[in-house]
Image: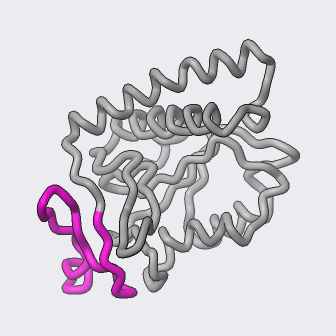
Amino acid sequence: MDEVVEYLPKLEEGFWKVKNKAGTELKWLYETKEQIIKKADDFIEKAKNAHKLMLERGMTFSQMGTKQQNLLSSGLEAEVIKEFAKYDEILEFSNPVLKAGGKAGEFDGLVSEYLIEVKYNVSGETKSGKFLEQFEKYINRNHKDYINVENKKVVLFIKEFSKGGNVNQSVLKQLQKKGVIIITELSQIKKIY
């Protein structure tokens, strides 16, 4: 019990602050539930134009430019967090986690039960190194950039696969072995509650 309390974030000067088990001091901006929902609604609205453009051009996500991909990804993060909100309390959404000298990571979504990572597209050619390293921040309590300080279960939401990718590819199987829950449809969210 003492270990759990030791790593609970404390609100100070408009930021949540905590030191992770590895000793890294982390902080992220405090946002009210109303601010989070407004931000999510704004992201969804901005993504609509990017989605329309993608359809008009007959393009895939991977063929879109970086700006359009970012808009589509942010919109998807917002859709996912709003779906989780039907079953759980939203704590964070699209909120960078800072450390001395830079960024430790980002909460795509954080609810009472889960830390949520959202990927619009995962390719069958995804290299495991960098991809798995990102998840170390969520599952390895001794990682210097561990941001899952309340040790929540981790969910990976994937909208689509390309270049032969699927939920059975090696990199995703490795995550599942480490306890990451993989979801590919919004309707699957209710099944984990």
Foreground of the two, 14 or 129: 14
Chosen colour scheme: one colour
Tell me what residue is drawn at x 37 percent, y 62 percent.
97
* Percent of width and height locating residue 189: 49, 41
Q: Quadrant of residue 2?
A: bottom left
* Percent of width and height locating residue 86: 34, 34
* Percent of width and height locating residue 184: 63, 42
Q: Is residue 21 magenta?
A: yes
On screen, residue 148 above or below 38: below
Q: Residue furthest toward the right?
A: 164
Tell me what residue is drawn at x 45 percent, y 85 percent.
142
On screen, residue 6 above or below 93: below
Q: Quadrant of residue 10?
A: bottom left
Q: Is residue 3 magenta?
A: yes
Residue 94 placement, left or right of 159: left
On screen, residue 155 above or below 26: above
Numbered range of the magenta stretch: 1-27
Residue 112 placement, left or right of 84: left
Residue 2 placement, left or right of 84: left
